[in-house]
Image (tube, rainbow, N blue to C red):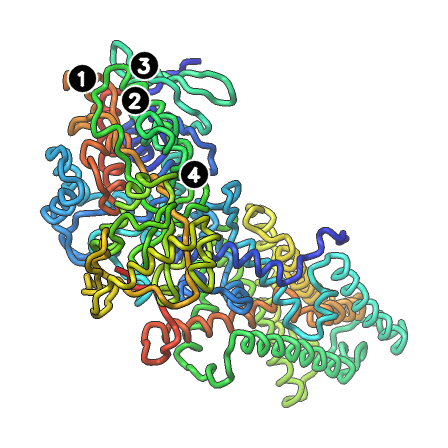
Amino acid sequence: MDSPEQRPAPLEVLVQEAERQLTVCNACRYCEGYCAVFPALELRRDLKQDDIIYLANLCFECRACYYACPFTPPHEFGLNIPQALAAVRRETYAAYATPRLLSRLFGGSRFLLGLTVALCILLVFGSVLLIQGSDVVFAGGAAPGSFYRVVPYTAMVIPALALSAYWLVALAAGGVRFWRGAGGTPRRLLDPSSLLRATRDAFGLAYLKGSGDGCAYPDERPAHARRWLHQLLVAGILLDLASTSVAAVYHNFFGRDAPYAYTSWPVVLGTAGGLLIVLGALGLLRLKRRADPQPADAGMLALDYAFLVLLLLTSVSGLALLVLRDTAAQGTLLTVHLGIVAALYLTLPYGKFAHVVYRYAALVRYHIEQRRALSPELDEGSKGRPAGP
Amino acid sequence: MNPLYDVVVVGGGNAALCAAMEARRAGASVLILEAAPRHSRGGNSRHTRNVRLVHERATDHLEGAYPEDEFWRDLIEVTGETDERLARLLIRDSAGLGAWMTANGVRWQPALAGTLQLSRTNAFFLGGGKALLNTYYDTALRLGVEVAYESEVADVVPAGEGGASVSFRRGGVSREARGRAVVVASGGFEADLDWLGEHWGAAAANFAVRGTPFNKGGPLRALLAQGAKPVADPRAFHAIAVDARGPRFDGGIVTRLDTIPFGIVVNRHAQRFADEGAGLWPKRYASWGALIAAQPDQVAYSILDAKAAEAYMPSAYPPLRAASLRDLAPALGLDPAALQATVQRYNTAIQPGTYDPARLDDCRTAGLDPPKSHWALPMTDPPFLAYPLRPGITFTYHGLAVDERARVLGQDGSPMPGLFAAGEVMAGNVLRRGYLGGVGMTIGSVFGRIAGREAAKHGLA
């Protein structure tokens, strides 16, 4: 349970602290070779709130700067950049996505998240039980169309589409706000080379590579574990997305109803995806538990755990449904799985998943800005390192 | 209880770690005694960021070529006198250093187009000195070097058969370690303000120490008392102008200010006292520590107008700002009339010229004492900015005389058996005054490695 003193500080306070720290960094610049944050910082002198939010979302939390910094606590400068930026990021997620009321609700509280999941499951299971009756829910059987006897197709697809539209719109609104806050216009987005570079950095997790040795996670010795586990998770999610898309095509264009055979594309892709998610999520959970707590922000860590646990629950319930779909547990597992997916979608725009949007936008902005800084004819306004006598 | 090691290394910075790794690789049992706790281990090396290296062709961390003769000329230009044998050895041995550092885990800053460019003379290690030390400690521990933190060495007593007995304090308890050979790599004495006070009197209390508070010079003092031969001027130190609001110790790079050439500098009486535009800044900046140390209360104020507001590297502390010199002066504790008069005299002495911060331009004063020889622009545009300055000591030169095998020499010039020195504690052999960027790390690495190898040879014999 969250006590009042654990409640996250408002964005402005966190921004002020990050600004204090980054001002020291800008006079030092030893970390400029580590990631995009420091070269982006060097283009600025006076840091405004939007600059801090941009820099915070550019940070991959590789933690290299923390271990390299001679000014971390107990030094009186008390620099802890990964922590300060993670705190700002966490508040960005809460402040930028709409509606803000929900973002407060899902702001990393384990209790509220658990409650959401439980309520979603209860809602789906309860309404199915009420409407369909217990003989349908506990009937079992894996014949094509048996899922839809429990939850009719439209009753499954319409809420699913509505929830998907919901999180997409909520996140997109956050993305637009983020881009505008940074002074960006839609026109500036039309920069194919910067989009390409940002995409490459995002999918390659460029700033978790270190200088080839990996990032300083879980401790100061560089390692590749975090990057690889994250990639397992991404691959798993993409495979599951592919599985759902193939299933939609099967259903709508070929009239083939779920559940599908074990050797069918939706099941093969979905199973592989589910297993990768389980591996990635368990690995990351274990890694985060072992990780040095000093450079971590407790609030961000709570969001990390929440998202990983939800992904894990989604996959495990999906895989359990696959294994037990011939049994009487089928209806129960289906409704539990759908309830968890509903909770996942509902919390998506306010939690860890939001980093996909904000970090990508920050990377695009970074590449646009770096390109302009390097070719001054593109933009007279930016300045690099002053050339003094 | 008085455990015996082949090699005891006193200190925990770059030179100490280089010595420890080399000695351990040669088969010696090695103990490092580091005065600092783990989180602030590494002496002044943790505030460094590059190393000066001779090389014949471009590498992944250096551009072009930097031949031995050029390094030699650069060194002589700053220091004037040196021990030529040791200086030549230093320069020659720096050639293989980059590869050795890479092999020991050091990573180099990548050459990102534009923002970051490789340097021709100095290789920049990724993340700076603390990252380098983290790597070295990791490597040393994996090799089997023992490290004792929070172990401040109080005395080094040479043993008759060679080596020494090293007494140190840890956890409030006096302890002792015996080394068949001992490498002293404990840095200078710049953090001992009493010792500085012996030469500088009350002024020493107004100095900032840019590096570790643990460089108190205990081992240096002990060996000098045991008859080791001193080198370099005990009064000399390298100091620059730092922000007076910075920490007393350990401010590192971030309190350094490079505003001086863009405005004027006045003392407590609002009077200018030196030519702010003499020479290009990278070479000139080193003289300002001593210049400010000679002013009343060891304090000075760098004053700028709005034209210079973005000309210099961003500072860790914001400048004091005011709409007029009259309003700025009280914030600095200066007499407004005196400051206005000084600026007025300076403004009227400025000759017409073409301002160019990238070279020695022709914007200068005439008939003003002291003059400003370059980059003199009238200070007229509000807001006016100011930074309080004080001398920030980087390191002291006074140290132990050594030979080309890094052996500590006695008063008669013969080596003291089994005693070796490396790094700042013997840098005065090569560098008597001034500074050449990155040469401290070259001295620590080259002589650290030599000391480690020689100590292992002696300890295992």
Number of numbered callouts drawn: 4
- Asked if both marks, 3 and 2, belong to the same chain, the answer given is yes
- The nearer-to-camera label among 4 and 1 is 4
Residue B411 is marked as: 1
- At numbered mark 4, what does the secondary structure look like: helix, strand or loop? loop
Task: Please tell me in which quadrant of the rendered image residue B194 appears.
Answer: top left
At label 4, which amino acid type do we have?
Answer: Phe
Tell me the distance, in whole angstroms, between the alpha carbons under discs 1 and 2: 19 Å
- The nearer-to-camera label among 2 and 4 is 4
Tell me the distance, in whole angstroms, between the alpha carbons under discs 3 and 1: 16 Å
| Residue A338: % across, % down | 74, 71
Circle 3 is placed at which residue position?
B157
- Asked if both marks, 2 and 4, belong to the same chain, the answer given is yes
At label 1, which amino acid type do we have?
Answer: Gln
Circle 2 is placed at which residue position?
B182
Tell me the distance, in whole angstroms, between the alpha carbons under discs 3 and 2: 10 Å
Note whether A177 is above or below B431 in the view shown. Answer: below
Picture quarter with the N terminus of chain B: top left
At label 2, which amino acid type do we have?
Answer: Val
Tell me the distance, in whole angstroms, between the alpha carbons under discs 4 and 3: 30 Å
Tell me the distance, in whole angstroms, between the alpha carbons under discs 2 and 4: 28 Å
Q: Residue at x 65, y 71 (%)?
A: A349
- The nearer-to-camera label among 1 and 2 is 1
- Asked if both marks, 1 and 2, belong to the same chain, the answer given is yes
- At numbered mark 3, what does the secondary structure look like: helix, strand or loop? strand
Mark before the other along the chain sequence, 1 or 2: 2
At label 3, which amino acid type do we have?
Answer: Val
Q: Residue at x 50, y 42 (%)?
A: A75
The 10 Å Cα crowd at callout 4, few under 14, some 14 to 19, many 20 or more, is some
Chain of the residue on which disc 4 is drawn: B
- Left or right: A378, with B228 as reference point: right
